[in-house]
Amino acid sequence: MSGSYAVIAGPLLIPFALVTQAMAAQFTFHVPVRIENATPLTRAQVACTVFDTRGSMGSGRSPIPLSSGVYDGTVTVAFDLAADRSPLAARTYHCTIELWARDRGGFEFFTGYMGIEEDYPSNTGQDLVELVPVVRGDLPR
C-alpha cells in the first residue's frame, strides 16, 4: 500500500515505582507510547509483567486510548501480586505492546511482543517505520 506507514514506538519504559502505601498498587509503570497513522488498529494495550528468579509473578494491562489509529502519551499500568507473593521478590520486568487490527480483508487479528514486526505489515500492508515491541530490565532495589 503505497504512501501509508505506521510508527509504533512503544512501549518505552520511564520511571518505575514500587508503591507501598495502603490502597495503592504494588507495581506502577508509566509507559510512553507513540502510534501514528495506524488506521487498521481497532484497539491496543500495554502489558507489563514482573518476574522473580523462577518466572512470572504477576502482570497488568491497560488500554491505549486510540483515536483514528493515533496515540501519543503515557499509559499507566498498575497491578498487585497475588496475596501469597511478595513484591520484594520481584527482580525484573518487561512491558510490551499488544495490538488488534483489521487485515486487508477486514478480519480482526491479534499480535503482540515480537510478532508485531512480522504480523502487522504482512496483514495490513503498512510498513512499520519504527518499532520497540518490548522493554525489559532489572527492578530498582
Image: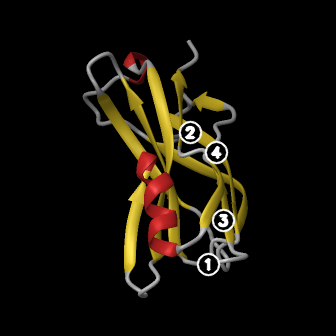
Q: Mark 1 points at which residue?
A: 1
Residue at the spot x=41%, y=24% of the render?
87
From mark 4 to mark 3, how far is it between C-alphas? 19 Å
Q: Do the residues labelled 1 and 3 touch (CB within 8 Å)?
A: no
**22 and 105: which is toward the camera:** 105
The amino acid pointed to by label 2 is: Thr
- What type is the residue that disc 1 sits on? Met
The image quadrant where one finds the N terminus is bottom right
Instruction: Determine whether label 1 and label 2 are within 8 Å by CB.
Output: no
Q: Which circle marks residue 102 in the picture?
A: none
Q: Residue furthest bottom?
A: 106
Task: Specify whether 57 is left or right of 100.
Answer: left
Q: Is mark 2 on a helix, strand or loop?
A: strand
Q: Residue furthest top?
A: 141
Marked residue nearer the N-terminal end (4 or 1): 1
- The x, y position of residue 130, in whole percent, is 67, 51
Circles 4, 2 touching at the beta carbon (< 8 Å): no
How would you rate the neighbour count of disc 2 (Cα within 10 Å): few for under 14, some for 14-19, many for 20 or more?
Answer: some
Q: Name the residue under label 2.
A: 28
Give residue 133's position: percent from left, percent from top.
53, 46
**Residue 40 quadrant:** bottom right
Q: Say which label, 1 or 3, has the lower sequence index.
A: 1
* Three-letter code, disc 3: Ala
Q: Which residue lies furthest to the front in this view?
A: 2
Which of marks 2 and 1 precedes in the sequence?
A: 1
Q: How far apart are marks 4 and 1 (CA)?
A: 30 Å
Q: Which of marks 1 and 2 is in front?
A: 1
What secondary structure is found at the residue carrying circle 3?
strand
For marks 2 and 3, the one nearer the N-term is 3
Give the residue number, with chain letter if any, for mark 4. 31
